[in-house]
Image (cartoon, rainbow, N blue to C red):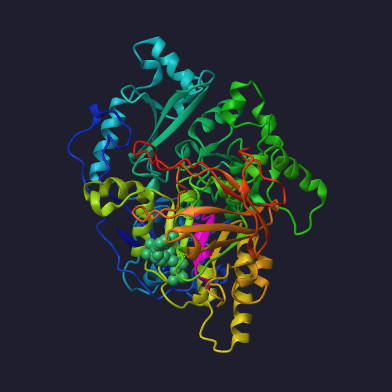
Amino acid sequence: MWVLLRGGYPLRILLPLRGEWMGQRGLPRSLVIGPPRRRYRKEALPALEVPVLPVTATEIRQYLRAHGIPFQDGHSCLRAPSPFVKALQLKDQTGATASFSLFIDKTTGRFLCMSSLAEGSWEDFQASVEGQGDGAREGVLLGEAPEAEDSEEIRRIWDRAIPLWELPEPEEAQLARVMFGLTKVTDDTLRRYSVRYLRPARSLVFPWFSPGGMGLRGLKLLSAEGQGNEVHYKETTIPRPGVYCNLFGLPLISRRDVEVVLTSRELDSLALNQSTGLPTLALPRGTACLPPALLPYLEQFRRIVLWLGDDLRSWEAAKLFARKLNPKRCSLVRPGDQQPRPLEALNRGLNLSRILRTALPAWHKSIVSFRQLREEVLGELSNVEQAAGIRWNRFPDLNRLLKGHRKGELTVFTGPTGSGKTTFISEYALDLCTQGVNTLWGSFEISNVRLARVMLTQFAVGRLEEQLDRYDEWADRFEDLPLYFMTFHGQQSIRTVIDTMQHAVYVYDICHVVIDNLQFMMGHEQLSTDRIAAQDYIVGAFRKFATDNSCHVTLVIHPRKEDDDKELQTASIFGSAKASQEADNVLILQDRKLVTGPGKRYLQVSKNRFDGDVGVFPLEFNKSSLTFSIPPKSKARLKKVKDDNGLVTKKPSSGRKGAVPQNSETCLGQAHHSYQPNPSKPSR
Ligand SMILES: Nc1ncnc2c1ncn2[C@@H]1O[C@H](COP(=O)(O)OP(=O)(O)OP(=O)(O)O)[C@@H](O)[C@H]1O
């Protein structure tokens, strides 16, 4: 089901439409009761096509002053007396801070009342101040009781789970400790955090208690599976990940605590607290996002240390989250050999307090010296693979040329009209999204329903019309992807689009925005000089957005009108040279149907700022799955490209896999490992 966000932003999110049952959640069948069920969210709001401009912190302050509402300026929120707490309740509370229990997010205007757990949008708040209804609904994320079915399931699992030390067989307890790396974590720590073990699912169970201590809101189950020398962890949450907003460890935080360490896993928080005694909280969805709804709970801290993990992705996430939390109060633990994630540090006998002392301030001024950068450069050099970004599962040739998908870059994508640009870019973005890249789509030409249909078909790698009985299965999995759509259709102003993107980055930690296509922001200028100037301005705005927000932007631009039988080149992109100059990557979908017949396309990478490798590789269109996978039998071959004008020579490949000459132009065709989605695998 598509539901518009409250607050009027032109974003749509995919909300639960699930037939999720416990068997699908990876829990043992013995715990499954009843048939698969389908649940609809009750209050689907109609799509609002008129975008509401985001509010600024200054406007919020002005509004509060104009209405005589006192407020305190916090790190990411403004605090004010809550209109949702009755006078009687207020009297019971002590001190001024207790009465300032309303937290208004400075970036979005969304509010949360910590006393009543009411929350709502900035418009809701204004409506309630101006006496137009109560404006708030009971806390959507944090206060609202779980849905009855979830609630039953949570209770049933929680009641069946027991503390590790109560397991009847000591061998079983020992095995569980080894699997989860808990050999050095004491029973006392597990007891303090109320961690239990669910025997039938061989999973640890982490509870999510309501902030007011009013019962259980949800659970996270963590199972561990040995694969060779490695252990793979799998998380299952109830409710589903999109609404699982637990800051694990919150009940142990005292109101007087002024410092906290944020981790990305519950196990890390256990290790950290045990060895340092410091307050610590684990984020609900690890490094994937920091939902702004949690910010009020972090306002009390004057210092926040982010220790999210041991890879470059965790480091990137820490930097992004620090922006949201206010970098001036944040320090970051840099991943490194001697600074692994907290649980591993404990197991290796490292001094966690000392590691925390080395945390770097997140805040630095506009001018930095190499001294401040040297560690960052070393981090990139020693993690070359990770620095190259996220690799595509479905497009190995794209990995060989571009190396990966990196934050903060601008990719310009072009191709002849009707050649399959949208279809290709949909699969290219979907591939990344299935690997946890939070993605926002701006599809101005085709409707979101049509786009989602294409994407779902590509996700299922097959024609869904012919297997409608499996529709729910695929749709349920698709829904859990971190995928969001703007509701714009037709012409839009660039300002509105950028504001919406900014909002999405803040609220959903979006790391990839796809804009299809730029021509829809160019207004109705008739003169070609105006159009070119407008395009330059828009390209510049997207470039700046990508850099400022560490967010990748993929921009589809139509080519200029050229002879049908000529291949496109970088200079064929509509407008001046600005687009290709500003872009980090330029991709061209070559439609040589005259030579190759329908279906066959080539993807040309004609600019690659990361390492200079450019080239071209074939794409075979599969009409039933709408995918561009390369057929498994295609033989590796190398084609040299002299320049943008096309192929000039063809010769058999030397057969050496993955060897791409630096700064050469290469055409690759390579045995392709077709993507086989496995419904038993979690989608994140
Ligand atoms: N390689 C291909 N061979 C045949 N049909 C294709 C191919 N790629 C895409 N199509 C089909 O062509 C139609 C148009 O594709 P798509 O909308 O992706 O093109 P586009 O380049 O984005 O179009 P536009 O120039 O209008 O933006 C779709 O129905 C799609 O399924």
Can residue 291 be seen at all in this image of the molecule?
Answer: yes
| Image position, residue 377 (x, y; %) | 75, 44
Q: Quadrant of residue 381?
A: top right
Count of picture labels: 0
Task: Say if the magenta span includes residue 514.
Answer: yes
Q: Residue at x 35, y 48 (%)?
A: 460
Q: Is residue 415 left or right of residue 310?
A: left
Q: Quadrant of ligand 1?
A: bottom left
Residue 66 shown left or right of residue 148 in the figure:
right
Question: What segment carries the magenta color?
Answer: 501-518
User: In the displayed image of the protein, which residue is found farthest to the top?
Assistant: 170
Q: Nearest the camera: 451 or 369?
A: 451
Q: Is residue 615 above or below residue 187?
A: below
Quadrant that contains the C terminus: top left
The percent position of residue 675, horizontal first and vertical second, equals: 43, 43
- Residue at 64% x, 76% y is 536
